[in-house]
Image: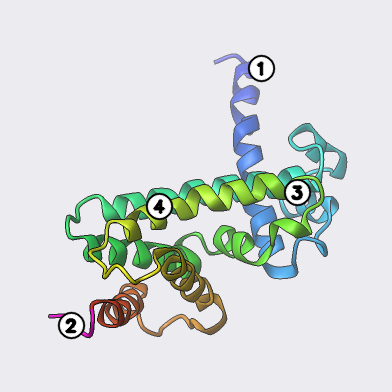
């Protein structure tokens, strides 16, 4: 094999470097916050010259938008895969909640926590886009809750906000080695079900 082809084969592909930057940015944003992290910090985390990062992203806001987009994609795929084999509406919501918690605490922790802790209004110029990403992801839970057999006096909108808020707050109290995300999700959904089905007991 010609030396120039071998050399080219050793070079990281641009999309791979971009993903490395996103992973590093998500980790730094999660650990130190969006505003306290610089472009230089992100470049240094992947052994890249500070100026080279601008080949991939024009600003820190663009990186945050990409982190949000990638995070929503990854977490959304987990939720969709968890829900797909279930048919019962409550089981589907429980599976989605467990997948969401798993992403927050284990699988995609950095990305998920950036989406929760970096609010759209904190990012100049891209707030509307970040809100759209959040809205599109949360629509999965809206559809799941809309399919529940609930009494007519239950406000599904506020039920969704309450559930997502409870799930997202887990980043404060969840400790590795504690109850598995599936156990926590089951307890959450069972509690909701008891309170919304006119006092009916779950099996």
Numbered disc 4: secondary structure: helix
Residue 188 drawn at (x, y percent):
35, 78
Question: How far is mark 4 from mark 3, CA to CA?
Answer: 38 Å
Residue 177 drawn at (x, y percent):
41, 83
- Which sits earlier in the primary sequence, circle 2 or circle 4? 4
- Which sits earlier in the primary sequence, circle 1 or circle 4? 1
Q: Which residue in the structure is indicated by mark 4? A: 140
Residue 148 drawn at (x, y percent):
26, 62
Q: Is 197 displayed left or right of 110 in the figure? A: left
Mark 3, mark 2: which one is toward the viewer?
A: 2
Residue 21 appears in view: no
| Colour pattern | rainbow
- Which sits earlier in the primary sequence, circle 2 or circle 1? 1
Q: Quadrant of residue 27?
A: bottom right
Q: Which residue in the structure is indicated by mark 3? A: 47
Q: Are discs 3 and 1 less than 8 Å apart at CB?
A: no
Mark 2, mark 1: which one is toward the viewer?
A: 2
Q: Which residue in the structure is indicated by mark 2? A: 200
- 140 shown above or below 149: above
Which residue is pictured at 34% across the width and 50% down the height?
80
Question: How far is mark 3 from mark 1, CA to CA?
Answer: 23 Å
Callout 4: 10 Å neighbours few (<14), some, many (20+)?
Answer: some
- 30 shown above or below 123: below
Numbered disc 2: secondary structure: loop
Q: Which residues are magenta?
A: 198-203
Q: Which residue in the structure is indicated by mark 1? A: 4
Q: Quadrant of residue 87?
A: bottom left
Which residue is pictured at 78% across the width and 44% down the height?
48
Callout 2: 10 Å neighbours few (<14), some, many (20+)?
Answer: few
Residue 105 drawn at (x, y percent):
48, 70
């Amino acid at each position: 094999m010609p030396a120039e082809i071998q050399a080219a084969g050793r070079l990281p592909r641009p999309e791979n470097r971009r993903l490395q930057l996103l992973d590093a940015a998500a980790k730094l944003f999660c650990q130190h916050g969006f505003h306290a992290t610089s472009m230089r910090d992100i470049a240094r985390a992947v052994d890249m010259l500070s100026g080279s990062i601008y080949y991939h992203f024009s600003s820190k806001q663009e990186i945050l938008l990409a982190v949000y987009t990638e995070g929503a994609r990854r977490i959304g795929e987990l939720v969709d895969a968890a829900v797909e084999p279930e048919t019962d509406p409550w089981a589907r919501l429980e599976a989605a909640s467990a997948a969401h918690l798993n992403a927050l605490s284990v699988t995609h922790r950095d990305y998920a926590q950036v989406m929760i802790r970096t609010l759209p209004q904190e990012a100049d110029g891209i707030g509307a886009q970040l809100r759209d990403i959040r809205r599109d992801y949360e629509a999965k839970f809206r559809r799941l809750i809309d399919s529940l057999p609930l009494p007519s006096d239950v406000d599904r909108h506020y039920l969704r906000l309450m559930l997502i808020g409870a799930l997202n707050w887990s980043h404060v109290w969840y400790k590795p080695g504690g109850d598995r995300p599936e156990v926590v999700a089951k307890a959450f959904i069972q509690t909701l079900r008891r309170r919304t089905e006119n006092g009916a007991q779950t099996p």
